Amino acid sequence: MVGAGSWGTALARHLSLRGAAVSLWGRDPALVERIRSTRENARYLPGLPVPAEVIVTSDPGEALRAAGVVLVAVPSHGVEDVLARLARAIPDDAVVVSATKGIEPRRARRMSELLEEVLPGRPVAVLSGPSFAREVAQGLPAALVVASADDETARRLQRGLGTPTLRLYTNRDVVGVEVGGALKNVIAIATGLSDGMALGDNARAALITRGLAEIARLGVAMGAQASTFLGLAGLGDLVLTCTGSQSRNHALGLRIAGGESLAAAEGGTSMIAEGVRTARAALALAGRAGVAMPICAEVAAVLFDGKPAAEALRSLLSREPRPEEEPVAGGTSRA
């Protein structure tokens, strides 16, 4: 398990309790030592013990020696540097699984694209879907998607990572699963802004629904299957992140609507809100694909250009009315 944040720790705990041999690698030696000595990740997952069987280390060789599956749960902006550091220690036949829901900000690469570049020749898969780390660590029921272009790789991970409380479904649409998992964070910031302005349940429902349309429009233009966005990695994760009390992206939107700067909102927590960096990356992808993403554009304007949230709302509401059933595939769309 690469990454000792909340999601990495939760997955390490989950897999250890199901009987797997697990190593948890973290790049912060001080954090690693605290987890090792207290058997708790008090910074990211307080109150839930890390099983004694989990090897907690900052030594790449110790963590990755003979690993059959390497799960990567590192914030999107740090994945490339971390994997470049660990590449020589990762076995050539290991399956590398991205558990990061974001878009690499520098070149707007999906995580699987980045993994394939940094770790050529290794099988790559993606784990995504509606999942708050604490609930998975507690053993509460959840359903996720394992996506891989290779059916046998996906089935192997389905068998090896799933439990009666963590139900895994396979999917061959890697692009759709990644786009859905990343972009839902941007829409969650939008719903946080809306809720922070007390705009009501109707407004939140509209943002979720039209946000899903934006995500699907971009995903299909990138080669994804439209049906993926109605599944766990699309609608399921979007609804959870836009409405759940544990959503860090929704919480960031609330804080900004309450008058905090982006720097203050991000600095007030140790958790990373992936939607911040994904907003710009999504617009870069949309520009390449020739599709419009008005909600993402307004979120980016609020985050980076100092546009007041109320003005962003007015911009969305004053747009030219469009047919709801506009196609999501092919050509430029202004929906």
Image (cartoon, helix red, strand yellow):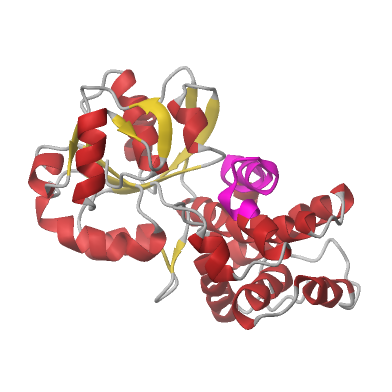
Residue situated in front as seen by the camera: 249 or 254: 254
Residue situated in front as seen by the camera: 327 or 269: 269
Q: How many marks?
A: 0
Query: Which residue is found at the position 60% from the left and 46% from the top?
Result: 247
Query: Which residue is found at the position 42% from the left and 36% from the top?
Result: 45
Query: Which residue is found at the position 71% from the left and 79% from the top?
Result: 307
Q: Position of residue 136 (x, y in %)?
A: 47, 29
Quarter of the figure with the N terminus: top left
**Whether residue 121 is visible:** yes
Residue 241 in magenta stretch:
yes
Residue range highlighted in magenta? 230-251
Query: Which residue is found at the position 55% from the left and 66% from the top?
Result: 264
Q: Position of residue 290 (x, y in %)?
A: 63, 79
Using the image, determine if residue 238 lies above or below residue 88. Answer: above
Q: Position of residue 241 (x, y in %)?
A: 63, 46
Quarter of the figure with the C terminus: bottom right
The reply, left or right, for residue 304 in relation to residue 133 is: right
Q: Quadrant of residue 44?
A: top left
Q: Position of residue 35 (x, y in %)?
A: 26, 36
**Whether residue 119 is visible:** no
The reply, left or right, for residue 92 in relation to residue 334 is: left
